[in-house]
Amino acid sequence: MKKDKEIILESTTLWDYPTQNYGDRPHGDNKFNGVTPAFVIWNLLQRYTKPGDLVVDPMVGSGTTIDVAKELDRKVIGYDIAPYRSDIFQNDARHIPLDDNSVDFVFIDSPYSNNVKYSEHPQCIGKISCEKEEFFDELEKVTKEIHRILKPEKFISWLIGDHWRKNSGFIPVSIKLYQRLCKYFESIDIICVVRRNQTSNTSIWHKRAIEFNFYLRGFKYLLIFRKSQILNRKS
């Protein structure tokens, strides 16, 4: 059990963080809609990168990846279709303006559907419902770009959640994305990241989940892949 804001290198596939941030300095904005836990990025960069490596986040949101990477002496580029602050470059993740085989690590925390308002940008993937196959087609375009810019034998990690709504039921977004990623990368592992502070974590929602026989989303998947030269030769 971790103490509040304690930062350690994870040794299991279950990650549970009591707060979004660690330390005394902000890493991104913990008020940002769908903000990534800074602990997640810290652990990934410790395991899969070294100082001086180039880290890229194609959907950087409030800039958590930028802040953690700089603190760990990694080079970093953060893109977003609707930049939240001045050190984020405006760009659509389906067309990343970097050379082939030029990046050491990619982290991405993408939309899970259109259930959250991510931005006003008309091309935002978060405006497409995961009930449509188009949603996964667009994420696959992002996957292809990540594969193109990532160096051989380097790693990508993708944080993704599943979807449940009364009218559409359960949609295994993470599994459907996983299947797309397997077309381009070698699967390394899957981490479960406990969800905290979501709007549904209230007594009324827990009561509804029991009364109407459905489950609230308790975790997200952290998918870890490698750009394998062997897989590339096969594809």
Image (cartoon, grey):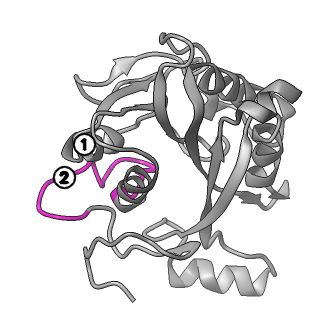
Residues at marks 1 and 2 touching, judged by CB atoms closer than 8 Å = yes
For badge 1, the amino acid type reads Asp
Residue picked out by circle 2? 26
1 or 2: mark nearer the eye:
1
For the residue carrying disc 1, how many other residues have a C-alpha within 10 Å: few (<14), some (14-19), or many (20+)? some
Residue 160 pos. (x, y %): 62, 51
Element under label 1? Answer: helix
Q: Main secondary structure of the magenta part?
A: loop
Does label 1 or label 2 sit earlier along the sequence?
2
Residue picked out by circle 1? 67
Indicate whether residue 30 is drawn in magenta.
yes
Q: Which residue lies furthest to the left in this view?
A: 24
Residue 208 pos. (x, y %): 68, 80
Side of 114 where 121 appears, left or right: left
For badge 2, the amino acid type reads Pro
Quadrant (top left, top right, bottom left, bottom right) of the C terminus: top right
Front one among 161 and 181: 181
- The span picked out in magenta is 22-38
